[in-house]
Amino acid sequence: MSDQPQSEIRNYLLSKKLPIDVLMEVEDHFVTQINELQNHEQQDFNQAFDKTKNSWQNELKPYWNGSLSLEDVSDFMRKVRKENEISNLQFALKWSVLPLIMIFTGLLLFDAEKFGIFTISILIAMEIAVFINYLHHYQDFKLVKKYPNYTLTWHQHSIFIFIIILSPTINIFERFLNSPEKYQNLLLLKGNISEFIFTLLPILLLIFGSLFSYSSQKNYLRQIQKVKPYLKHLKLSN
């Protein structure tokens, strides 16, 4: 396909506000469908393009579906978003088991003070690991700022979760440093169940949030390598 028709397809899809990695896949489908219509039904480009747009109209049309989010989103993007979230959730659920096993092992092996330090060390290490990964690939992550008018990949919305959870992280550290015996006893179920839950929940939030953020970063880096050749078609921010 020549540059002009390809540009028309690209501009049309850009108007639909698709993430660029998704747009690239949809563009391939558009080109394939248009070529098939031109070759098998002897249609010119405009006819084939219009027919292809009509076939995708319902999937690409943004609308509010009555959910808590007031954002207008197409069914196609809801499907993509759900798949991305499930991927990150599965990663976080799978790997959160390891730090939890370590924490509950420390609960049985150490006295209160050592247990507090041990738990804090695990949680800090997880936060630092995600932050180091961000710094190591900073040139790739900063592309989001260079192209603020576009969503390069849906994963970019979750790469900073590890920063958002810093506040509960600090709260957890203060608890374990100031009252290690109290929280060790609570985690040993030497208290009521509600206190155990409210003690465990912030720890789970930090572990899960760090892993979810890391998974998003990992998936972003994979997708951004596909997107980079396409950036020449996008407008830089002023």
Image: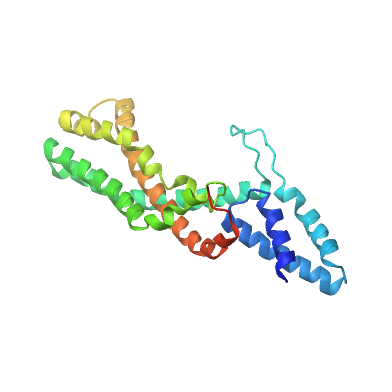
Left or right for 126, reference 109? right
Identity of the residue furthest to the right in this view = 42
Q: Is residue 131 visible?
A: yes
Q: Is residue 214 left or right of residue 23?
A: left
- What residue is shown at x 45% (from left), y 46% (from top)? 158
Image quadrant in which you'd find residue 178: top left
Q: Residue furthest bottom?
A: 39
Where is residue 219? Give x, y as percent: 46, 57
Q: Against 202, is 34 above or below? A: below
Please state, as top left, top right, bottom left or bottom right, where the N terminus lies in the image: bottom right
Left or right, residue 172 beside residue 10: left
Residue 168 drawn above or below residue 38: above
Where is residue 134? Give x, y as percent: 36, 52
Residue depicted at 51% across the width and 48% down the height: 85
Q: Residue furthest front?
A: 238
Looking at the picture, how far across and down is residue 149, in whole percent?
57, 46
**Which residue sits at x=29%, y=31%?**
199
Q: Nearer the viewer, residue 223 or 178?
A: 223
Closer-to-camera residue (127/97): 127
Tell me if 203 is positioned left or right of 40 in this view.
left
- Residue 31 position in % (x across, y down): 72, 66
For the point 84% across and 73% down, the residue is: 40
| Near-viewer residue (144 or 223) | 144
Q: Is residue 111 visible?
A: no
Q: Is residue 163 above or below residue 235?
A: above
